[in-house]
Amino acid sequence: MTPITSPEDLGRVLKMYRKKLHLTQIEAGGKFNLTQKTVSNIENGRPGVQLETLFRLMSALNLEIHLEPRDKPYKGEAPW
């Protein structure tokens, strides 16, 4: 499983899965009424994406989130 610790990590993983499904951004977004720009923003880890929008894209890609504790606690300020 790929650790996701930032919006950019999440965007890269979503893009990887979208490409595995041979979907364009337009096709993936169209399944749940998201624009190509919105899908691009998510895949690039841009700030301001609403959770509902993120979950709609994940549904289009047939993905879900599983959370688990980190092996080591994060020290310092979050990079985002």
Image (cartoon, rainbow, N blue to C red):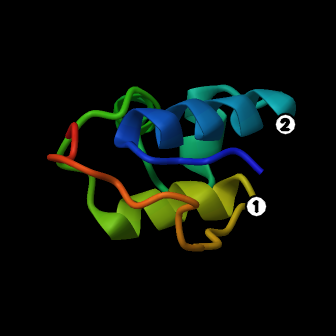
Asked if the residue under mark 2 is in contact with the one under mark 1, i.e. CB atoms within 8 Å, the reply is yes
Location of the C terminus (image quadrant): top left
Q: Is residue 53 left or right of residue 28?
A: left
In percent of the image, x 64 and y 64: which residue is there? 59
Identify the residue under disc 2.
Answer: 21
Q: Residue 38, image x and y in percent?
A: 36, 38
Residue 69 is situated, as x and y percent measured from the top left of the image, at: 54, 72
Which residue does the numbered mark 1 point to in the structure image? 62
Q: Is residue 32 visible?
A: no
Looking at the picture, does residue 56 appear above or below residue 41?
Answer: below
**Residue at (59, 73) in percent of width and height:** 68
Q: Secondary structure at mark 1?
A: loop
Which label's residue is closer to the chain start, 1 or 2?
A: 2
Asked if residue 68 is positioned above or below residue 11 in the image, the reply reads below
Of 44 and 37, nearer the camera is 44
Vertical arrangement, residue 9 with respect to residue 63, above or below: above
**Residue at 58% across, 73% down:** 67
Judged from the image, the secondary structure of the residue bearing numbered disc 2 is loop
Tell me the quarter of the picture where residue 65 sits.
bottom right
Q: Is residue 51 left or right of residue 24?
A: left
At 50% from the left and 43% from the top, the residue drawn is: 10
Mark 2 Cα shell of 10 Å, populated few (<14), some (14-19), many (≥20) = few
Measuring from the top left, give residue 62's x and y in whole percent: 76, 61
36 vs 47, left or right, is: right
Q: Residues within 10 Å of mark 1 (few under 14, many from 20)?
A: few
- The amino acid pointed to by label 2 is Leu
How far apart in space, not on screen, are marks 1 and 2 (Cα)?
Answer: 10 Å
- Whether residue 35 sits left or right of residue 11 in the image: it is left
